[in-house]
Image: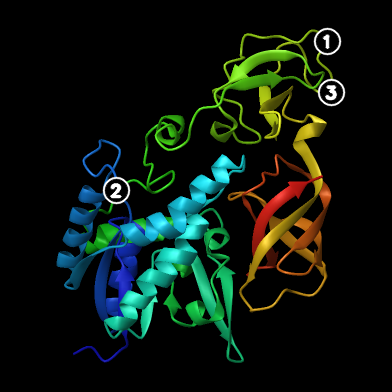
């Protein structure tokens, strides 16, 4: 029997969780793998890779020498994540299902299941770290800044952080790949998964079409002229450039960084009039925001940080932007930025940082 803790690892079939499991085994822990099945509407589809992912996870468990269990969380996922995802899209916002999935499935349903198996800790292949300071737990960025996933984990609580390990958070991705190759893991060269877990690589609009009714309407430019027709506001997001169907339209004398041949971007969505507003030029003023309001905040410390200066991300893979936080009541807060932020999108997460420490964040409501 291993002398360490009993740790249940979420094995996704990917290389990061595989190396995480191997590292824990090397450290002497009693490691058990769990493969989470979160989606089953089109299991046999060319876009749904869960069957292959499970085979990869099982092969990894075999090489490492640990048991693996296949657990179906599809019902919980549909109720807690997908239903909210559809509600947000129908309201004209752009939600982030990965944030919800981590809060509701990977660190709630999965954590509960792991505890029933006698686990002392759970582990995943996320690029993040947990640090204990005077009995409190902090969520830190992963050491590999190009892979840091703390943005998606910002809703984790003290109770969840206390029971979570992120073994690859201390490593760079290149090192993880090298280790996987050295160990002889069957998925050492498997490419990273992209996109939303239940959509896979399929065209996004095609997927949403199955659940949300099309409501076509006018596409207008900043002067109010109708220059095209959209397929339904739910299918577009702020800052979107591709798939607008207006590439051939030129606005003579287009202003503000546009120019006759400048590309069009989605700048506003008016749900009341079912209008999609577009502008020309990446740096158009309508795409720039110096402030935002957010709600439904979740703070890793259990309470909002003090008002003051912090760094913030309004989307994954952006550098922290300097901002001034003004906490509000009932989970609301306001951010003022020193520099304009591009295409701040309602429904996405605004996540706060104090250096390498992720403090938490909330859902963007409106930007100004």
In this view, the residue in front, 88 or 111, is 88
Where does the image place residue 366, in percent across and percent down from the top left?
A: 75, 48
Upstream in the sequence, badge 2 or badge 1?
2
Where residue 256 is drawn, which disc sits there?
3
Secondary structure at numbered mark 3: loop
Residue located 36% across and 70% down the image: 110
Which of pointers 2 and 1 indicates the residue nearer the eye? Answer: 1
Of the 4 image quadrants, the one containing the C terminus is: top right
User: Which quadrant holds residue 237?
Assistant: top right
Say whether residue 82 is left or right of residue 215: left
Say whether residue 113 is left or right of residue 134: left
Q: Which residue lies under the disc numbered 2?
A: 190
Of the 4 image quadrants, the one containing the N terminus is: bottom left
Q: Are marks 2 and 1 in contact (CB under 8 Å)?
A: no
Dot 1 surroundings within 10 Å: few (below 14), some, or many (20 or more)? few
From mark 3 to mark 2, how far is it between C-alphas? 44 Å
Q: Which residue lies under the disc numbered 1?
A: 253
Secondary structure at numbered mark 2: loop
Where residue 49 is drawn, which disc sits there?
none
Secondary structure at numbered mark 1: loop
The answer to whether residue 171 shows anywhere in this view is no
Upstream in the sequence, badge 3 or badge 2?
2
From mark 2 to mark 1, how far is it between C-alphas? 49 Å
Where does the image place residue 5, in percent across and percent down from the top left?
A: 32, 87
Say whether residue 160 is left or right of residue 140: left
Where does the image place residue 350, in percent across and percent down from the top left?
A: 67, 56
Q: Are marks 3 and 1 in contact (CB under 8 Å)?
A: no
């Amino acid at each position: 029997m291993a002398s360490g803790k009993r740790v249940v690892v979420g094995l996704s079939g990917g290389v990061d969780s595989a190396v995480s499991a191997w590292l824990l085994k090397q450290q002497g822990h009693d490691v058990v793998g769990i493969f989470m099945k979160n989606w089953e509407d089109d299991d046999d589809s060319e876009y749904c890779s869960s069957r292959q992912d499970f085979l990869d996870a099982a092969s990894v468990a075999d090489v490492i020498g640990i048991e693996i269990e296949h657990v179906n969380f599809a019902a919980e996922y549909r109720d807690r994540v997908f239903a909210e995802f559809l509600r947000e899209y129908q309201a004209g916002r752009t939600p982030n299902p990965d944030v919800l999935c981590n809060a509701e499935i990977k660190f709630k349903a999965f954590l509960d299941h792991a505890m029933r198996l006698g686990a002392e800790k759970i582990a995943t292949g996320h690029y993040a770290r947990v640090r204990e300071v005077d009995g409190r737990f902090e969520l830190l960025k992963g050491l590999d800044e190009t892979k840091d996933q703390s943005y998606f984990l910002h809703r984790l609580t003290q109770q969840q952080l206390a029971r979570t390990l992120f073994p690859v958070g201390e490593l760079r991705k290149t090192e993880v790949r090298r280790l996987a190759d050295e160990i002889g893991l069957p998925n050492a060269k498997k490419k990273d998964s992209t996109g939303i877990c239940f959509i896979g690589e399929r065209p996004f609009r095609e997927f949403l079409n199955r659940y949300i009714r099309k409501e076509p309407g006018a596409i207008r430019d900043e002067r109010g002229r109708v220059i095209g027709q959209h397929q339904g506001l739910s299918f577009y997001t702020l800052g979107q450039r591709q798939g607008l169907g207006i590439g051939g339209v030129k606005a003579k004398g287009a202003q503000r960084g546009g120019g006759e041949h400048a590309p069009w971007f989605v700048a506003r969505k008016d749900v009341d009039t079912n209008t999609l507003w577009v502008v020309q030029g990446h740096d158009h003023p309508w795409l720039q925001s110096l402030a935002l309001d957010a709600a439904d905040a979740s703070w890793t410390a259990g309470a909002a940080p003090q008002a003051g200066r912090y760094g913030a991300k309004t989307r994954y893979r952006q550098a922290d932007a300097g901002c001034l936080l003004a906490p509000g009541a009932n989970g609301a807060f306001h951010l003022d930025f020193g520099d304009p932020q591009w295409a701040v999108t309602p429904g996405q997460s605004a996540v706060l940082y104090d250096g390498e420490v992720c403090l938490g964040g909330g859902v963007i409501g409106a930007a100004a």
